[in-house]
Image: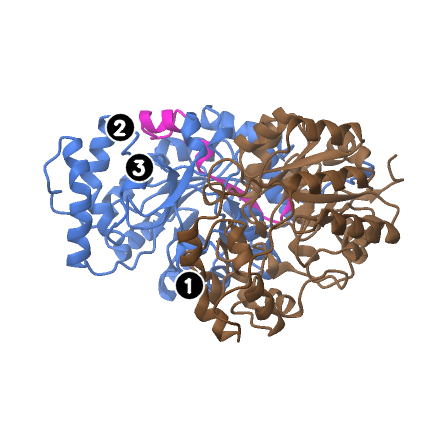
Chain colours: A brown, B blue
Amino acid sequence: MTATVPPSDVAQKSSLSPFLRNAGVRFPVFQAPMAGGPDSPALAAAVSEAGGLGSLGCAYLTPEKIEQAAAALRALTSRPFALNLFVRADPPRDAAAHSRAANELEPLRRELGLGAHPPPPRELPNVDAQLEAVLRIKPRVFTFTFGVPRREQLAALRAAGVLVMGTATSLEEGRALEAAGVDAICAQGSEAGGHRGTFIGEPERSLIGVLTLTRQLVTKLHTPIVAAGGIMDGAGLRAALELGAVAAQLGTAFMLCPEAGTHAAHRKALRSPDARHTVVTRAFSGRAARGIENRFTREVQGPAAFPHQQALTAELRAAAAEQGRVDLMQLWSGQNAALLRELPAAQLVAKLVQEAGLQGTTPGP
Amino acid sequence: MTATVPPSDVAQKSSLSPFLRNAGVRFPVFQAPMAGGPDSPALAAAVSEAGGLGSLGCAYLTPEKIEQAAAALRALTSRPFALNLFVRADPPRDAAAHSRAANELEPLRRELGLGAHPPPPRELPNVDAQLEAVLRIKPRVFTFTFGVPRREQLAALRAAGVLVMGTATSLEEGRALEAAGVDAICAQGSEAGGHRGTFIGEPERSLIGVLTLTRQLVTKLHTPIVAAGGIMDGAGLRAALELGAVAAQLGTAFMLCPEAGTHAAHRKALRSPDARHTVVTRAFSGRAARGIENRFTREVQGPAAFPHQQALTAELRAAAAEQGRVDLMQLWSGQNAALLRELPAAQLVAKLVQEAGLQGTTPGP
């Protein structure tokens, strides 16, 4: 190549971000929340201790459990961390759809040795009550998906000194979040594993690659952007910064860390060539989410809406995991599991920073 | 952000690529082939003159027309350029599927003032004969999608001093191309507009974001990788280089250039907010391709296989374009049309280079 490249101005761009300074992180590496298994207080604490931003998905936890998890995290680190919630607006249960979905699951339940009918569903905790727990805990950062908290809730978080980051899967959503006055926006690229954060339109219509989405949000908005989806190493992190993101958020990359709560069979699937084929499926929860394609994602075609399908499959998912049945397990993964490394979280953060050629200095305030 | 970044080693990485040196380009900017309209000898020549690699999609041209187009290109520039073909293996025409597809199109044909039945299809030119034309022309670079030329065809191209670049949408395909001994591989990210190059498995299962796909191919293979999909500006180009690509290939970015053959109504659609919603559709050609969602992509649900649907819709697409009916036109676009700029191609290449901070030196051999 007959071209030369002057020094990168990534440092200059990111060094100007008050968001990262205020978040008190040393490196632009956020660990994505992965509610319901892969994330854990131990993982979040290790990432935060290493100079990144650890994160805990609290979507399925009661307010009491959220406070317990945050206490566990604080026992392990005095560094800043993030808590994450789903800002849900659950649709009422549709009896006919529910019954069809239950019927479809019946043969799979039997195959796992379960009775024909799932136990009565445990309702997901009330979002307002969860948010109040977050307000009591006052994490340095609160992140959310699936929607936007109400104006007074955002104001209360801000008054409590909590930084707020919403999740966008499209430019429209980015604009809605900026209008709500968030401190940062996570650009969730189509590559990302787990639930799609989409809250305007259908998630399947907002599968925009992280390079494209990040660049659109950086160019059209004024809010700091955090890039998420498929970022696994220092080159990916550097690419995110070149696109104008202030940080990269990595989920799948942390799933094999010993501190992660990732199930053994899930770990095995992530290491296997199967992980190359992921799909965006509603089969497990009723909401679109990216995971490794398996028999369950192929066979379950008529799920109920979220969170009703989530409740309908709860016992089945637990039994499948218990029995190590990767064909029926929920195997969330981003598109880039092929580049997964199995390292303690602190070493992984250090490696990302080293590969990206980033040099940390003293922690922010 | 309390981190500092040392100078980028992008220059070093890309300066080592014999592929770009041999291709004789000054800047790591390739213009994507866009057969059937948007590309043109004038566009390819302008890009090549500006130091990038211009490209002409020849998939729908007879051998004679390919030679005419190459002559037109050579009349405009003495710089290297690329010719592109589809390495097709057309399935036989399925009479029942064909008839269903024709019936589905009938009301749309009538709406455009056409007769109930399309005229007898013009067959696409024979690929071997197209490849022989390319061999006679000896472009500096030959690029292909949809498959891999036969061993003796690749050997003949190599013997003629033609560099060869295949297209991969997955790691599996990248491995197949590397095994075939290509000189470079285009990593076609899910963001890219137009036909998906997929040749192993279903295209809809190979929608991998460009950041992820590029990084996988760069990490797992030894062949130079060219990143494509959603790259619109210098930041995107720089991100591609950070990921280890030796160049970026841009299609949509060039579609508003005055030299492009893009239809006026297509240009209008690309500038409109409609361009934010693209879909991967088989409705127009029978092969999966990304374009702006419209009534045609929503309503046509049972297309025949490629190239039979392509033939069935030929007259309809021409009439829709003629009448400026964006609801029924084929509107190929990548996911990042929101960042489109309307500039002469030479200015666009210069802007990309300047934004990316790349400094060209003397052309290669």
In percent of width and height, residue B214 lies at 56, 51
Horizontal arrangement in the rendering, residue B134 relative to residue B229 (left or right): left
Magenta run includes residue A133: no
Using the numbered discs, state the Cα–Cα distance from disc 3 to disc 1 in whole angstroms. 41 Å
* Amino acid type indicated by mark 1: Asn
* Disc assigned to residue B325: 2
What range is drawn magenta here?
B242-269
Position above or below: A219 against A56: above
Classed neighbour count for the residue bearing mark 2: other residues with Cα under 10 Å, few (<14), some (14–19), many (≥20): some
Classed neighbour count for the residue bearing mark 3: other residues with Cα under 10 Å, few (<14), some (14–19), many (≥20): many
In percent of width and height, residue A211 lies at 57, 41
Magenta run includes residue B265: yes
Horizontal arrangement in the rendering, residue B321 relative to residue B146 (left or right): left
Q: Which numbered disc flags the more N-terminal residue, 2 or 3?
A: 2
Chain letter behind tag 3: B
What residue did someone put label 1 on? Answer: A103
Chain letter behind tag 1: A
Say what secondary structure mark 3 lies in: loop
Chain letter behind tag 2: B
What residue did someone put label 3 on? Answer: B330
